[in-house]
Structure formats: C-alpha cells, structure tokens
Amino acid sequence: MTTRGSRWPSTLLVLLLVGVACVAIYTFRRPILRAAGWALVANENVKSADVIVLTIDSDGGGVLEAADLVHSGLAARVALFVEFPDVIEQEFIRRGVPYENHATTSIRELNALGVGNVERISQYVSGTEDEGPALAAWCDQQRIRSVVVITSPDHSRRIRRVLHRAVKGNNTSFAIHCARYSTFDPDHWWETHDGTRIEIEELEKLLLDIVRHPMS
C-alpha cells in the first residue's frame, strides 16, 4: 500500500518539472515570437532604381517611404496600381458623387510631399498574386530595368516570392523595400490585437504560398 510520505518525491518532481517548463517558456517566448514576426519580413537595400512602385497594400506608410526615397535621390519616378471601383463605389459614381480611389489619394499625398513624377499602372489587380505578373508586364512595356517595390513589412516576404516567380526570364531586377511607418512591428506584434491579427493572417498566407510554390 502506497503511503502519503512515499508520494511526496513524485509530487515534488512533477512540480519541479512544471517550474522548469514555465521558466523555459518565459525565457524563450519573446525570441520565438520575434522570429515569427520577422519570418514575414524581407527588406533589401538598393542605391538606385529606374522607378519606385507602391503595392496596393502599402497605404500611407508606402507614400511616406516613396517620398523619402525620391528626395534621397534613389529614383525620380513613382508608380502605383489603379484600383477599380467596386459595386458600392460604382453606385456612388452613378449617383453623381465624386469617386476618389486609393491611387488618387496617394498621388495627391505624393504631390503634397514634393513628388511630382507619379504615374499609374493601369493593369487590373485584385490581390497579391496579380501584382507580380502585372508589374512584370508593365516593366516590359516601359523598358524598365530596375524597380524598388515598397510594401508593408508584414507583406514583404510574400510579395517577394510572387515577384520572383513573375520575373523569371525577365530583364527587370526587383528589390523589396519595407515602409518604415507601419502598424505592424515584428518585434512586438503580439502586444496588440491588430498586430496579432496581422501576424496570423499573413503567416497563413505565406505558408499557403510556400505549400503551393515550394520552389519560389
């Protein structure tokens, strides 16, 4: 028959193992979470390019980054994709309400920041997968040989994979550059609800892209 005293060593051992596990989790939690955040990020340095291109997800942070790069002398031209109005926006237009899409807003902001040479890429894109082929085709038409693509940090590694597939056999070189002004911080993403949401969504999309295109 097992006595109460004989159970104490086993109980103490379990408590000790639980304590060690808790300390290990606490010690390595932040490095693991940071690694998960930086897994989404790809940022390449470049000194010059023919044109700076904003992805459709770059938002205001991309506009600010593009303006800074132009003023630093990296490139004189900026290009961005045109977003076509959806059903709701088309109805506003039909009713005579002026429609201002994201591209129009970005161009106005770039002009206000002192960037005058801005053009639209008029090829239709509905998401990341469309941006690579559309940008590659536009660069061929424009005979552009070097491009800096500005995107948000959380989106950067996936768009680099998409572009890598799109430019195979193409003479244009692409460099991915992350906007410094972003709501996503790879070092602290788990501390906010938005950061956690972005990390989960983008990590799922990145893993799906890797499964679908393992050789990218």
Image (tube, rainbow, N blue to C red):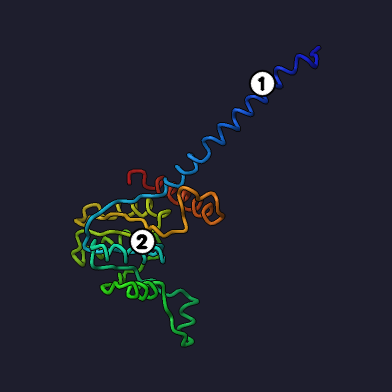
List the single residue furthest toward the front: 72
The CA span between labels 2 and 1 is 57 Å
**Relative to 20, is 76 on the left or the right?**
left
Q: Neighbour class for label 2 at 10 Å: few (<14), some, many (≥20)?
A: some
Q: Neighbour class for label 1 at 10 Å: few (<14), some, many (≥20)?
A: few
**Relative to 2, is 101 on the left or the right?**
left
Q: Earlier in the sequence, mark 2 or mark 1?
A: 1
- Residue 97 position, x and y percent, is 47, 85
- Residue 187 position, x and y percent, is 46, 47
Q: Which mark is residue 182?
A: none
CB within 8 Å, label 2 to label 1: no
Q: What secondary structure is found at the residue carrying circle 2?
A: helix
Q: Where, quadrant-wise, is the N terminus in this rendering?
A: top right
Residue at point 67%, 24% (across, down): 14
Q: Is residue 132 above or below residue 204?
A: below
Residue on which disc 1 sits? 13
**Relative to 173, is 105 on the left or the right?**
right
Q: What secondary structure is found at the residue carrying circle 1?
A: helix
- Residue 147 position, x and y percent, is 25, 59
Q: Amino acid at mark 2?
A: Asp
Judged by depth in the image, the label closer to the viewer, 2 or 1, is 1
- Residue 44 position, x and y percent, is 30, 51
Residue at point 23%, 67% (across, down): 76
Q: Is residue 170 above or below residue 115?
A: above
Q: Is 81 in front, or is 48? A: 48
Which picture quadrant has residue 131?
A: bottom left
Q: Amino acid at mark 1?
A: Leu
Residue at point 40%, 58% (across, down): 152
Q: Is residue 186 visible?
A: yes
Which picture quadrant has residue 83?
A: bottom left
Q: Which mark is residue 130?
A: 2
Q: Is residue 15 above or below residue 74?
A: above
